[in-house]
Amino acid sequence: MILEFWQGPGDPLNALAGVLRAVGSIGALGGAGIALFLLFMSGELTADEATAARRWLFVLVLVGVLASLAAWPLRALSLARSPEAAMRADLYVAIARSRFGDAGLMRLAGLLLVLFALMRRSWATGMAVVGAVTVAASYAAFGHATQYRPRQELAALTVLHVSAAAFWFGSLFPLRNLTLRRDPRAAGEAFLVWSRYARTMVLLALASGLAAAWYLAGPARGLPASWFGWALIAKAALVALLLVHAFTARFRHVRLLLRGDVLAASALRRSLGRQILLGLLVLCVTAELVGVDPPDLGHRLPG
């Protein structure tokens, strides 16, 4: 997207591919995250809140599926460099057999499984969780995790990072509905339950993300020497700001809810809206990272 043109003349097709990566990640991670949210929080939700969460899940999965499907003809056009050649069936077969195809098909399969969360059955929830993990694994099938050493460690860290980040990001959408409860204390107690899960997920996302960044970019002092490093710095700054909002919500707004303060619900709802916006920006920066090569540390795999 932006870095495509900051680095030089830039390719509009690559920039458009970056936009689709960002939109696809927003839909895929949001939908997968809500599936995990329903797994952990179903016992704390009212019927209306669970319905609203499933409605968000459907919308986000639809966005993820459409963006993933749109990436295929764009990939073909990028490889063929002409609309006529991009229509060849053999080109799509080659794309399907590539790492891009591996990741795309895994993501589509995972998103379809995530839709099982729309059914109010325990076995369907299990299928949706399998889909969420498959979505996370698709990010290890294409990109830096397949191009740099140590490949196995990067793949494992990617799955952990994406799974944990998806839970956090996806949860923000249905959490806003909890602030509409008439009883602020009941809402505060539900937020406390979620925060226990979120604390673990945040630590997992941060630890795996830092480890993956160290493997790819080396020590922090070398980050300003590359565009990849600057993108990492931007992502870290946004995540830090997101954490500030999250901690403020947890230790200020939720505490007021537990005391019965009805005005705290509106403040918490606004805070969650800002966190969603910051989460969207984090995913956009992450999409930029995928299109930028890390600094040359002699760890790129051949091929």
Image (cartoon, grey):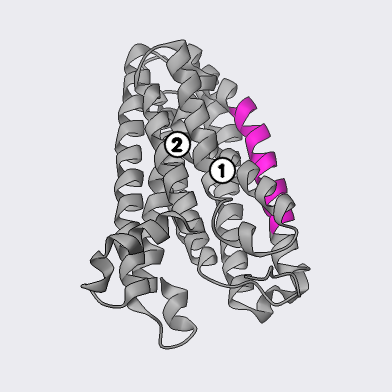
Q: Is residue 174 above or below residue 78?
A: above
For residue 260, say whether it is visible.
no
Q: Which residue is found at the position 38% from the left and 80% from the top?
A: 11
Q: Which residue is found at the position 47% from the left and 32% from the top?
A: 131
Q: Which residue is mark 1?
A: 137
Predominant SS of the magenta segment: helix
Q: Residue furthest left?
A: 84
Which quadrant of the view contains residue 205? top right
Q: Is residue 264 above or below residue 259?
A: below
Q: Nearer the viewer, residue 228 or 45?
A: 228
Q: Which mark is residue 115?
A: none
Segment colored magenta: 195-212
Q: Is residue 199 one of those drawn in magenta?
A: yes
Distance of mark 2 from mark 1, alpha carbons?
9 Å
Categorize mark 2 by other alpha carbons within 10 Å: few (<14), some (14-19), many (20+): many
Q: Residue furthest front?
A: 90
* Residue 224 position within the rendered picture, expressed as x and y whole percent measured from the top left: 67, 77
Q: Quadrant of the N terminus?
A: bottom left
Q: Which residue is mark 2?
A: 110
Left/right placement of residue 236 relative to residue 61 reads: right
Which is nearer the N-term, disc 2 or disc 1? 2
* Residue 173 position within the rendered picture, expressed as x and y whole percent measured from the top left: 40, 35
* Residue 140 position within the rendered picture, expressed as x and y whole percent measured from the top left: 59, 50
For residue 24, say whether it is visible.
yes
Dot 1 lies on which element?
A: helix
Q: Which residue is found at the position 73% from the left and 62% from the top?
A: 149
Dot 2 lies on which element?
A: helix
Cβ atoms at labels 2 and 1 below 8 Å apart: yes
Q: Label 2 is placed on what type of residue?
A: Gly
Q: Label 1 is placed on what type of residue?
A: Ala
Q: Which residue is found at the position 38% from the left and 65% from the top?
A: 17
